[in-house]
Image: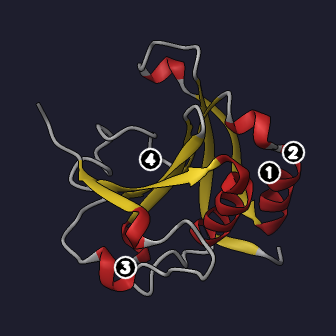
Amino acid sequence: MEYETTLEWDLWFHSINNNKWDKGSYKKIHTIKNLYDYKIITEIFKQNHYQNGMFFIMKSGVFPNWEDPTNRMGGCLSFKITSDRVIDEWNNILLKCIQERIMDRNNDKVTGISISPKKEFNIIKVWFSDDDFDYKEIFIENDNSELNLNNSLYKKHTFN
């Protein structure tokens, strides 16, 4: 099919009203296989959806938590996004993710992205399988975007 993505990506949801964090508390909603799926998601999901739960776009087969074997040795690059920009920023990084264009190279290390609501803003994260590279040198920034390295925080996944 034309417009297929190289990889399949799963859309997951976790409600902000659910205090459980076990695998059963996450709901797999859809699998993204092509750009038509991207278009459907961007047309259906609006600001109010992103304020009522956490959404994850993960490579198929990768569960959206840091304990997943694929995520364990990596970390997350987090961005604080103002509420009035969240739809544009999320749709932009979502497209880059499924096209494997978040970074200049090493896009195979990106396992997914997520968005989490806060009171006046949202947090968008880029998830990595490992951190044996310098993401600062290869992350692709856009002009007029809040998804820039000056507005970011990297946190390595660690076991307690």
Disc 2 is placed on an element classified as helix
**Callout 2 crowding tier (Cα within 10 Å): few <14, some 14–19, many ≥20:** few
**Which marked residue is nearer to the observer: mark 3 or mark 2?**
2
Q: Is residue 93 visible?
A: yes
**Which marked residue is nearer to the observer: mark 4 or mark 2?**
2
Which residue is identified by label 2? 44
Tell me what residue is drawn at x 67 percent, y 67 percent.
Answer: 92
Q: What label does residue 106 carry, if any? A: 3
In x, y percent, where is residue 83? 67, 46
Above or below residue 123? Residue 133 is below
Q: What amino acid does circle 1 point to?
A: Ile
Tell me what residue is drawn at x 83 percent, y 78 percent.
Answer: 2
Q: What amino acid does circle 4 point to?
A: Val
**Which marked residue is nearer to the observer: mark 1 or mark 4?**
1
Q: Earlier in the sequence, mark 3 or mark 1?
A: 1
Above or below residue 18? Residue 45 is below
Circles 2 and 1: CB distance less than 8 Å?
yes
In x, y percent, where is residue 104? 44, 87
Which residue is identified by label 4? 62
Q: Earlier in the sequence, mark 3 or mark 4?
A: 4
